[in-house]
Image (cartoon, rainbow, N blue to C red):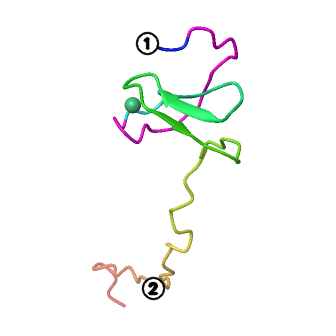
Amino acid sequence: MTEKENNQPRRFIAGAVCPRCGVMDRIVVSGDGVTRSCIDCGFSDERPGDTPAPLSTRVSRPAARRVETPADVVRLIDPNDKS
Ligand SMILES: [Zn+2]
């Protein structure tokens, strides 16, 4: 089924999710970096032009998530304090 005469090593893209079957870490890139394919479902795709850069970290998380809450002064009331 697959081309056996491809002597170029295939590289796995860490963290890449197959767009067809949705399985992670099954995407390999051919030695020339043009074709990516899924070893799980046989999906293959061409990526002309750009080198496959795996998205190492998703930067979708907003950094400005923190909400500044003013520190309230908490007074501890001692019920035994009669003064
Ligand atoms: Zn797949």
Quarter of the image for the N terminus: give it.
Answer: top left
Q: Is residue 54 magenta?
A: no
Instruction: Name the residue carrying label 2.
Output: 72
Q: Which mark is residue 70?
A: none
Q: Amino acid at mark 1?
A: Met
Q: Quadrant of ligand 1?
A: top left
* Viewer-nearest residue: 7 or 28: 7
Please tell me the numbered disc located at residue 1: 1
Height in image: 71 above or below 18?
below
Neighbourhood count class around disc 2 (C-alpha, 10 Å): few under 14, some 14–19, many 20 upward: few
Quarter of the figure that contains the C terminus:
bottom left
Q: In the image shown, does 80 or 64 lie closer to the viewer?
A: 64
Residue, x 62% and y 9% (percent of image)? 5
Q: How many marks?
A: 2
Instruction: Tell me: residue 8, above or below residue 73.
Output: above
Q: Main secondary structure of the magenta part?
A: loop
Q: Position of residue 81 (x, y in %)?
A: 34, 82
Is 14 located above or below residue 54 in the figure?
Answer: above
Q: Is residue 36 left or right of residue 9?
A: left
- Quick check: 13 left or right of 78? right
Picture coordinates of residue 74, whole percent (x, y): 42, 82
Label 1 packing within 10 angstroms: few (<14), some (14-19), many (20+): few
